[in-house]
Amino acid sequence: MKPDSYVVHIVDDEEPVRKSLAFLLTMSGFTVRVHESATHFLAVAPTLAHACLVTDLRMPDMSGVELLQKLGSIGALPPAIVITGHGDVPMAVSAMKAGAVDFIEKPFEDQILIDAITRAASRLEDPAEFFADDGLLRGRLDSLSDRERQVLCAVVSGLPNKTIAYDLDISPRTVEVHRANIMSKMQAKSLAELVRMAIALKIANAHR
C-alpha cells in the first residue's frame, strides 16, 4: 500500500521520542498521528480505519503487551509494531503472541522502522499470516540439528548467549555459530522474523 493510504499511529509516553518518530515518518511520506499514552490510543482505536500502530513496549500507564491484548479483546487491533529495549525479547515475544506483527530492538536505523511499517501495512490489504505454508516452515525446522533446536528455543525465549552457553555447557562463541546457522537454515532475516516462525511452529518459549 502507498504510505499516504493509511495512518501510522505512534504511542509513546516520551514526547521527544514521539516528535522524533513523527518527523521521520512524515518526511518519509507517511500520515502520522501521535498519542501520549496507551490509554489515549485505546480510547480512539475503535473509530480508526486503515491504521497501523507503532508502540513502545514499556510505558507507565499500560505496557505495549497490555495495549495489544486490550485492542484484540475489543476487535480493534491494527497491524502493530512494538519497539523494545535491549533485554526485552521475552516481552516482545509476548507482544507478538498478543498480535504484533513485528518488533524492533533499540537502537535501530530509520530504514528498519520504515520497512517494518511497510510490511505491517500489507496486512491491511492481505490479512493472511506471514507464513501460511506450515509445511515449508516445518521443513526448515527439520533441517536443524538437535543442538541448533535447543539454541533456537533458548534464543526465542530471550536468553542471552552467555546464559545459553552455560545451560548447554558450550562456549558463547559456539552459541554464536549455532545462531548464525539457525538464521541461515530458517531463512530468517531478523530476530523478529525468527520469533514469528517459532510462534507459528509453537516452539516459542519452549526452552528447557
Image: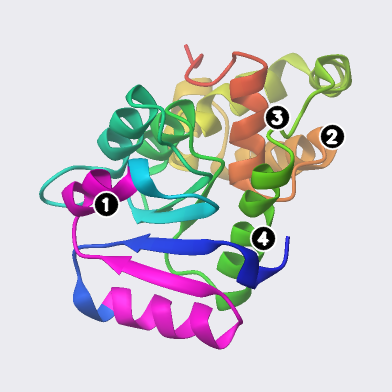
Q: Position of residue 54 (x, y in %)?
A: 43, 57
- Measure the alpha-carbon separation of dots 2 and 1: 39 Å
Stretch in magenta: 17-45
Side (left or right) of 59 relative to 103: left
What amino acid type is highlighted by mark number 1?
A: Phe
Q: Is residue 174 above or below residue 2?
A: above
Picture colour scheme: rainbow
Q: Which residue is mark 1?
A: 41
Of the two numbered discs 4 and 2 in the rendering, the one whose residue sits closer to the viewer: 4
Q: Earlier in the sequence, mark 2 or mark 1?
A: 1
Side (left or right) of 148 relative to 98: right
What amino acid type is highlighted by mark number 4?
A: Thr
Q: Which residue is mark 2?
A: 185
What amino acid type is highlighted by mark number 2?
A: Lys
The 10 Å Cα crowd at callout 4, few under 14, some 14 to 19, many 20 or more, is some
Q: Which residue is mark 3?
A: 129
